[in-house]
Image (tube, grey):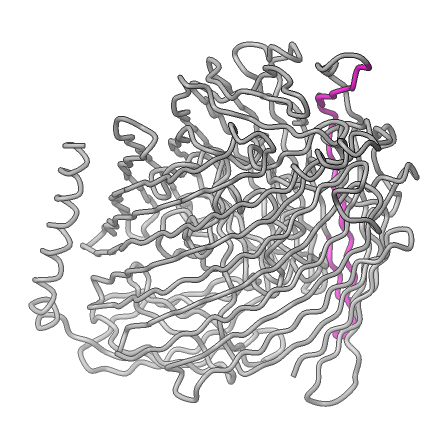
Amino acid sequence: MNRLSFYFAVIVLININFLTNINAEEKILEYGEITGKVIDVSTGESLPGVNLIIEHTTVGAASNIDGSFKIGKVPTGKITVTASLVGYRTESFDITLNADQIVELNFELREGIFEMGSVVITGTGTPHLYEDMPVKTEIIPQKVIQQTQSVNLACALNFQTGVRVENDCQNCNFTQVKILGFDGKYTQILIDGDPVISSLGGVYGLEHFPNEMIEQLEIVKGGGSALYGGGAVAGTINMITRRPAFNKAQFSYTGHSLDGQMDHKIGGFAEIVSNNGKSGAYIFGSTRKRNSYDHNGDGFSELGTLSNATFGINWYYRALENSELAISFHKIHEDRRGGNDFNLPVHEADVSEWLDHVRWGGKIRWEQRLSALLDYKVYYAFSLIERKSYFGGLGGNTPEDKLEALNFYGKTNNPMYVTGMQTNYRLENQLITAGIQYSEDKLEDNTVSNEVYHIDHNFTNFGAFIQDNFHFGEHNDLEIIIGARIDKHSELNSTIISPRINIKYAFHNGIKLRAGYTTGFKAPQIYNEDLHIGGLSGDQKTIKNSKSLKEERSKSYNMGFEYQEFVGDVALLIGFTGFYTKLDDAFATRYLRSEGNLDVWERYNSNSATVMGGELDLGIKPTNDLEIRGGIVLMDNEYEEADPDFNTKKFLRTPNSFGYLRASYEAAKSLNFFLGARFTGDAEVPHEITVEGSEDPLLILEQSNGYLEFDLGMAYKIPFLQNLDTILSLGIKNITNEYQDNLDTGAERDPAYVYGPSLPRSIYFGLSTSF
């Protein structure tokens, strides 16, 4: 703790020194102004929402609806002004700006790969252009989310190299996202950079957040604890929420038919920005209702019923020059149920998993640019989850059985908050970032029928981090990031130090080399799979931590290259990254015993685990009308010692190869076609089988098949009214109906024995109107 106090004191003193000297800096610095306009070079049309940034500063602006912009209080001297917009090639001007000078710059942007021109934050905690980010950051932009007809966060992650979303339960459809083979608990999911998705929130949270809430998704692979603390072992997914940009409203409907079982979703949003741009609000809402789906006709669902209603608002106000107060809030209510006998109360069904979630979340953030050299932000974010649940079923038809079935009702409360501050200071060729963060995660859970396994715990963590971003060369060709974070978690006796180093070198022909060493850790606490209680025959299953359980530590290495440039008129992207991660004291689970209707498993530290392999990314846009993107991962993953129950060193449920391909073609200005494909290789899948007359199940290891799914869709803009954009969408997902063909059946089935595509063939129809 003394070491933690020392680091904290250093960071506070640095920030105090910056703040006390800022007035002197303001007197020394001189400023000018930059104005201009941005247009599409092919059409000549104005481009709104373009990011105009003075490189290596936080000074910038966005273009208005007519493409015009003005950047005030620009530091004088030799500067580089860049213009970037998602899907366009970034352009820049090198100029010399004198004091009180007004310079006019007009940009003409050219369409490129979808990711081009995006501004990303997650890799360093500071804004960078996607193509210039020293830490490889992958994005899923809003346009791809719309093309793939993704209704929530889980769906939006389906077309990304090295990322898989899988359904792990036939009853409740518990999902998790896996990055490079690691289970979901090793991925840190952020909302606007804040780790406010708790273990409980991660169990079903991937399906909670609707597409109306998402602006883009940013993905960084490898250890991220140097910035985000415990949890970022496999990688980090940052959900950037939508904020007001223009005066606009939209309403939409999407319907999916799964062999006649319907999944309906209605959503909408409205955004408004004041004339002077000082304030704006984005309001969104959606409702979704899905019927149950039974693939094999045994009377038990493969996809349960689901009802979801969401409402939220993002608001900002710029009270002072170069400052912003931002407040966001959302409420999500979801009810889901799987099993059988949906017409009966849950405790009268043979098997039933029912969950009713209410999630309240939000954030308040103040950020201010004190000068061209220094900015800071302070924030407070929270989530409050209230869950009512039922995991169980009737063990028989006697009065005693019916009374016992009532014991499976549960309730969980999970308030969580995160608060902190961050400062960024620019010093010649350096960008120094430092900050502190405190989080508290309280969990009260009485889901398990046996009170011995009820949970009442409060997890806290204090972290302090510092990072230095160096630039070298006439065009900043070489960029190096060195940083570290120190954390004190309530479940650990000592502090954890997580260092990182990342290097990028950019050649002038469009080739970039990147390499990195990053670290991560996970403290021994409650994880998402612990809060999913489904078991065999309607019994419950729980995982408890070993008394000697200690934290996991990871070391990740990566190296690769990327070429992203125009070859003539063709936009081209080629990238390859090799990766290696070693996880020491890796968590593993083993079966202990059965206690009546409860199967007890234990989490313990095994020796170590490794993941290694390579991923290839390809993209080409031969014309403005056609874009093709794809990626594939080949890897090997295993524990140092074999699983005691299944006698394998391999990661369970994890294929050694998987990839995707997507293509979009704009046949006319009002007509667009989309083709998607996903490949998943075979994997080893655990299977529990009920043995008559024995309390212990039979544990066997199955080999799954590989799968290849195809999606096809179209979107047509109806020429309805001049100021009304109406888009009709039609398509088929999983055209060949690739689906697991050896599912367990009946009340004795193992609901966790499920793999492959999460949806059977489905036909969808969509209609959206904006004005």
Q: Quadrant of the C terminus?
A: bottom right
Tell me residue 486's x, y (percent): 26, 36
Looking at the picture, tell me which residue is in the foreground, 400 or 505.
Answer: 400
Q: Quadrant of residue 660?
A: top right
* Residue 414 horizontal side relative to residue 569, left or right: left
Q: Quadrant of the N terminus?
A: top left
Tell me residue 78's x, y (percent): 24, 66
Looking at the picture, tell me which residue is in the foreground, 219 or 296.
Answer: 296
Residue placed at 77% from the left, 72% from the top?
767
Residue placed at 54% from the left, 39% from the top?
446
> Quick check: 296 above or below 65?
above
Tell me residue 691's x, y (percent): 79, 15
Q: Can residue 79 be found in the magenta stretch?
A: no
Residue placed at 36% from the left, 65% from the top?
364
* Residue 17 horizontal side relative to residue 337, left or right: left
Tell me residue 419's x, y (percent): 32, 54
* Residue 554 horizontal side relative to residue 495, left or right: right
| Magenta residue span | 663-692
Residue placed at 60% from the left, 49% from the top?
388
Q: Main secondary structure of the magenta part?
A: strand
Q: Quick check: can you spot residue 39?
A: yes
Looking at the picture, tell me which residue is in the foreground, 479 or 453.
Answer: 453
Q: Can residue 665 be found in the magenta stretch?
A: yes
Looking at the picture, tell me which residue is in the foreground, 109 or 522.
Answer: 522
Q: Quick check: can you spot residue 668?
A: no
